[in-house]
Image: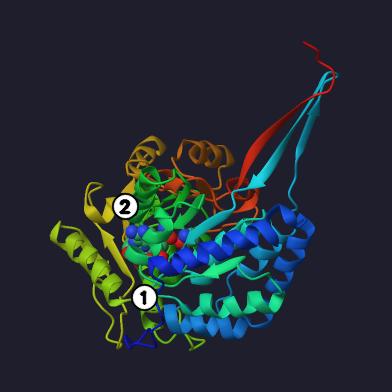
Amino acid sequence: MATGKVITSVAGASAADVNNAVNAAEKAFKTSWGLKVPGAQRGRLISKFADLLEKHQDELCALEALNVGTRFDERYWHVQILRWMGDKIHAKTVETTDKKMAYTRHEPYGIVGGIVPWNFPLLMASWKLGPALATGNTIILKPSEMTPLTALRIADLFNEAGFPPGVVNITNGYGATTGDAIAEHPKIQKVAFTGSTLTGRKILKASAETNLKVVTLELGGKSPTIIFDDADLEQTLKRAAGGIFTNMGQSCVAASRIFVQESIYPAFLEKFIALAKHLTDNTGSPFDPNTRHGPQISETQFNRVMGFINSGKQEGAKVAIGGERHEQEGYFIKPTVFTDVDSKMSIMQDEIFGPVCSVVKFKTEEEVLEVANDVAYGLGANVFTENASRAIRVAHALEAGSVWVNCAQALEMNMPFGGYKQSGIGRDLGQYALDMYTQVKAVHINIGLKL
Ligand SMILES: NC(=O)C1=CN([C@@H]2O[C@H](COP(=O)(O)OP(=O)(O)OC[C@H]3O[C@@H](n4cnc5c(N)ncnc54)[C@H](O)[C@@H]3O)[C@@H](O)[C@H]2O)C=CC1
Ligand code: BAL
């Protein structure tokens, strides 16, 4: 927790436990879920579950504040995403000719695995649960070993909503045991993962070496924020700060590279540093309504982020503000802004996942696009300009799965979200996510062709 003290410990699922969950999920899929249940009925149950999430919102947010360090009054949209998915009834397309009829069925895979991280535990769980259940799959959900609490609580709420036993199975545990057992299980037909690129590779490899399960991956990022000199400076400052410091930088679309056109660079930097100072001065408990900046999730993550800060210093970047731990007890790091960086430095190439960014001067659109795209990742990108043609041109040229114009980290539940390059495979959210949880079957019927 925020103070670095242990809250509790929970039982971890062994490979045998995962197997039991898979057997329960298989039985449920064949008897009380999947194509045995009309989409509308599944939707009603999901909606009932969403109502319960809403009813218990304070309790769930308190658990996330305690477990993750997220501000208690932060209300993410796990409820809305479940409602949105629950409303979508499974569609089929039909085609006929006079002699032959053919149609497609979009069928659930059966048992899917959802492996999710610790940065937004409930929200990430909802991104996997919603489309998996709406399309008729049963699911084995593995939360991060660091954030088991809300997942355990929602297991009760699934029962209260009336889901048949075995449809939702929560298996807590470590990646190397529980996660690996899911990735390797021969009866799991699809795994949806959010987390590090390193673990994404392992899951893909496990699939290749076992049953070739379908794998969708939402991985790391190194998002750029590009600010042209015609941008609305006051708005842009706040958006750019939110783009990196939200959730203490623990977001896959954290925009840790901020490119500012040269004529506004000095003014931007001065005000941006002031914003970072405001966060530093309002660092504290996630339960304090005045808190604007909290802790990193764990000692491991704290050390990882401090390691990046130290590497930036060693490679010759200049610390404009922050660059050290906050005096407060726990894993608090001061919002950190680097200047004088080189695009090949580790802080400009690697995912930091902490409140650390670099502010870099650029001259031309062409120059900034080249540097912005020169990373292994391609998850998100932000562009600030009042010139509509330039906004569209730059949005199209950026190698990223989501581009935000005059905003940052502004996801929508009905818009696809996922990565180019090493940021992932497949998409979460929207109809695209629903498509990722079904496989299509073509049924051909001869209604008059004679041999
Ligand atoms: N894209 C994103 O939203 C996230 C990215 N990350 C990145 O990853 C870095 C490391 O964080 P970690 O917590 O170590 O990420 P991770 O990728 O190891 O953990 C994410 C999930 O994967 C599971 N997992 C770990 N090893 C596994 C395996 N062999 N098979 C199956 N599942 C496995 C974990 O138990 C957890 O549930 C962060 O610093 C950040 O850069 C971390 C969390 C979320
Ligand atoms: N992993 C998707 C949400 C986020 O990290 O911003």
Q: Nearer the viewer, residue 436 or 421?
A: 436
What is the three-letter code of the residue carrying label 1? Ile
Question: On the rendered structure, is 42 left or right of 268?
Answer: right
Residue 4, percent from left and from top: 31, 85
Q: Which residue is mark 1?
A: 297
What colouring style does the render use? rainbow
How many numbered marks appear? 2
Question: On the rendered structure, is 186 left or right of 81?
Answer: left
Q: CA distance from mark 1 to mark 2?
A: 28 Å
Tell me the tag on residue 375: none
Seen at 76% across and 36% down, the residue is: 93
Residue 233, percent from left and from top: 49, 58
User: Callout 1 environment at 10 Å: few (<14), some (14 to 19), or many (20+)?
Assistant: many
The image quadrant where one finds ligand 1 is: bottom left
Q: Nearer the viewer, residue 216 or 393?
A: 216
Q: Are marks 1 and 2 in contact (CB under 8 Å)?
A: no
User: In the rendered image, which quarter contains the N terminus?
Assistant: bottom left
Q: Which residue is mark 2?
A: 360
